[in-house]
Amino acid sequence: MPSKLSSFSSLLLASTLGLATACDDGNADDAADDVGQNEGDHEYFDGEMSAALGADGNQARCSTCHSADGSLAGFSGQSAQDSAYKDSYKGGDAPDLISAVNACVTGWMGGAALADTDPEYIGLLGYLESISDPAETTPNTLAPEVLADEAAYEAAYAGGDAAAGAAKYAANCATCHDVALQVNLFPAYPKASLAGYSIGRIAQKVRTSGPPPSGTADASDTTPGPMPFFEPEELPAADLADIIAHLKG
């Protein structure tokens, strides 16, 4: 499929989803402004329809990992703002948007892959186009911090400030861990249980959970799973050290 749909797809979106638009009064300009801003579109990004793209009981949504306003703080993934027209995605592993969407839907959320004709994808696409500049085509980088083993993460992330880590935990981790949010088929570990893991294992999990494999020399690495990883760009090293100190305190 083409990686970009014509502007006609935005109007087709409204009829596909059975949504009212400003076309009702004959004002095409108003209709174009409204497409992507209605309940049906953004619900595939941040509502129950987004969670329903995943496995039965999945509670994670696109907005769990991605902001819609360009911000990175508190999110494990790049922002969805300006995401619709990139030349490629996932560090080049996904050649087009639907491939990137399906990598999340199947890999993180545990759902079935979408086709470009599915109303769910058309709905999500309409929303992403509405918050994207067609001129923004440069792919985002993908740069997980992969250290040799758990000991290397331990050395890198020991000595954080537990007091400072409380607010940073609330901003980056509480959304999932304070409510045992189900991601795919698995609830996030409750905060109280995290203190039982070593500093190195917590850091390794945060930095490399799920694809790509972590711990290039660590045969015991058990971090892969449905938790998305935070790159240093999204969660600076000092902040992660403080969060771990808070958990371990």
Image: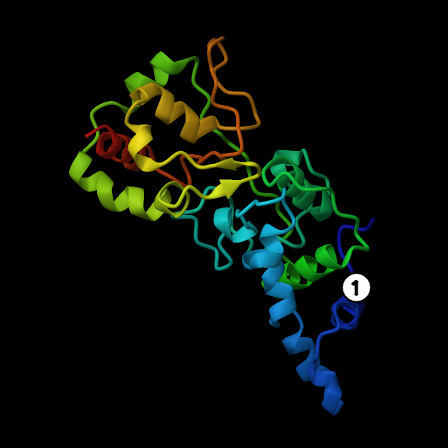
Residue 40 vs 83, above or below: the answer is below
- Is residue 202 found left or right of 119 in the rendered image? left
Residue 141 vs 124, above or below: the answer is above
Q: Quadrant of residue 201?
A: top left
Residue 157 vs 73, above or below: the answer is above
**Residue 39 position within the rendered picture, expressed as x and y whole percent measured from the top left:** 60, 70
The reply to whether residue 88 is in sight is no
**Residue 63 position within the rendered picture, expressed as x and y whole percent measured from the top left:** 51, 53
Number of numbered discs overlaid on the protein picture: 1
Q: Quadrant of the C terminus?
A: top left
Q: Quadrant of residue 190?
A: top left
Q: Residue at left 49%, top 49%?
A: 64
**Residue 237 position within the rendered picture, expressed as x and y whole percent measured from the top left:** 32, 32
Residue at numbered disc 1: 6
- Is residue 233 found left or right of 57 in the rendered image? left
Q: Residue at left 65%, top 55%?
A: 84
The residue at the far front in this view is 57
Q: Residue at left 57%, top 45%?
A: 57
Q: What's the amino acid at mark 1?
A: Ser
- Is residue 189 found left or right of 29 in the rendered image? left
**Residue 213 position within the rendered picture, expressed as x and y whole percent measured from the top left:** 55, 21
The reply to whether residue 17 is in sight is yes
